[in-house]
Image: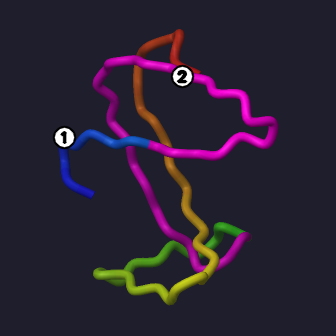
């Protein structure tokens, strides 16, 4: 992922209700991949190649002083 990039997340809701949320802000985000769902051993190799339909274990943290950020 590039620094200072814009991301868009697309999802499908279970009850077909469309919800739109728009916001602008700057946040520092860290992201790590792990070998298993125990999240005890982070992946250190780069690039990290995966197979189609392989389950990925990722931890993403947002670092911000904004108290309203949930």
* Whole-number angstrom distance, CA of label 1 to CA of label 2: 23 Å
**Residue 4, label in figure:** 1
Q: Quadrant of the C terminus?
A: top right
Callout 1–callout 2 Cβ contact below 8 Å? no
Q: Does 61 sit left or right of 29 as displayed?
A: right
Q: Where is residue 4? Give x, y as percent.
A: 18, 40
Classify residue 2 by image quadrant.
Answer: bottom left
Q: Quadrant of the N terminus?
A: bottom left
Residue that appears at 71% across and 71% down: 37
> Label 2: which residue?
20
Q: Where is residue 60? Give x, y as percent.
A: 50, 49
Main SS of the magenta part reads loop
Residue that appears at 30% across and 81% down: 46
State the residue in front, 28 or 55: 55
Q: Is residue 50 above or below residue 65?
A: below
State the residue lying farthest toward the front. 16
Q: How many marks?
A: 2
Residue that appears at 51% across and 20% down: 21
State the residue in front, 13 or 4: 13
Q: Does 31 sit left or right of 19 as displayed?
A: left
Coloration mode: rainbow
Helix, strand or loop at label 1? It is loop
First in sequence: mark 1 vs mark 2: 1
Q: Residues within 10 Å of mark 2 (few under 14, many from 20)?
A: few
Residue that appears at 71% across and 40% down: 13
- Report the magenta residues as a range: 9-37
């Amino acid at each position: 992922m590039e620094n200072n990039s814009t991301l868009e997340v697309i999802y499908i809701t279970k009850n077909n209700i469309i919800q739109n949320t728009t916001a602008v802000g700057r946040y520092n985000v860290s992201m790590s991949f792990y070998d298993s769902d125990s999240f005890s051993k982070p992946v250190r190799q780069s690039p990290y190649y995966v197979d189609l339909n392989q389950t990925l274990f990722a931890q993403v943290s947002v670092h911000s002083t904004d108290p309203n950020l949930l």
